Amino acid sequence: MTLTTISPRRLIGLFVVAAVAFLSIQALGATQAHAGVSQRVSYVKSGDFRTLATLWNTNAEAQFDCPAGAKIRVRYGGGWFAKNRQEQTLNCASIKRLSDGKWSLVVARMQIKVPETGYVHWNYITTGP
């Protein structure tokens, strides 16, 4: 069977079926997750740790580089049962990252403790649909 022997109606039908198959494949591929980055500026008072973001059942990451001497961490839970993880000190020479995944069953807080009151520039990155 050649193209000259296929009726125009059948040719249009085959074209429609191919187009629907192509669009279906494209729709399935659209479920991939992409990261969304938002640059944030937070005014932080010196003293104890201050919460920058509160997370629960989500994937998120934060990136910091300054101010030098600031301490960052992720605090899971609350009260006496709280646990601190990913504790790092900023040095303005390299980027430090905090991350939290969906596996976390308790609330997680990204926190910072600065040596002097001022503004902190940081990136908040979310992943997922």
Image (tube, grey):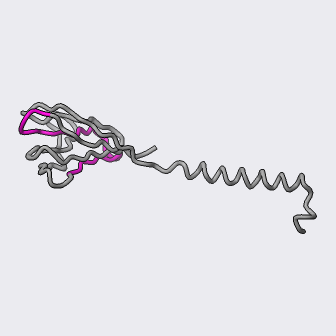
Q: Which residue corresponds to the image point at 65% horizontal and 50% vertical from the top-left?
A: 24
Position of 22 with respect to 115 (left or right) is right
Give 69 or 110, whichever is nearer the viewer: 69
Q: Give 27 or 117, whichever is nearer the viewer.
A: 117
Screen quadrant of the N terminus: bottom right
At horizontal 49% and vertical 51% (from top left) the residue drawn is: 32
Residues in magenta, as a range: 96-118
The image shows residue 117 at horizontal and vertical percentages of 9, 33
Quarter where residue 6 is shown: bottom right
Residue 114 is a magenta residue: yes
Write the residue at 23% across / 35% down: 41
Give percent across and percent down for residue 66: 15, 45
Give the left or right position of residue 115, taking residue 32 as reference: left
Q: Is residue 31 magenta?
A: no
Tell me which residue sits at (10%, 46%) in the image: 68
Q: What percent of the width, then of the height, locates residue 25? A: 63, 54
Residue 85 rendering spot, x and y as whole percentages: 18, 48
Depth check: 128 or 44 in front? 44
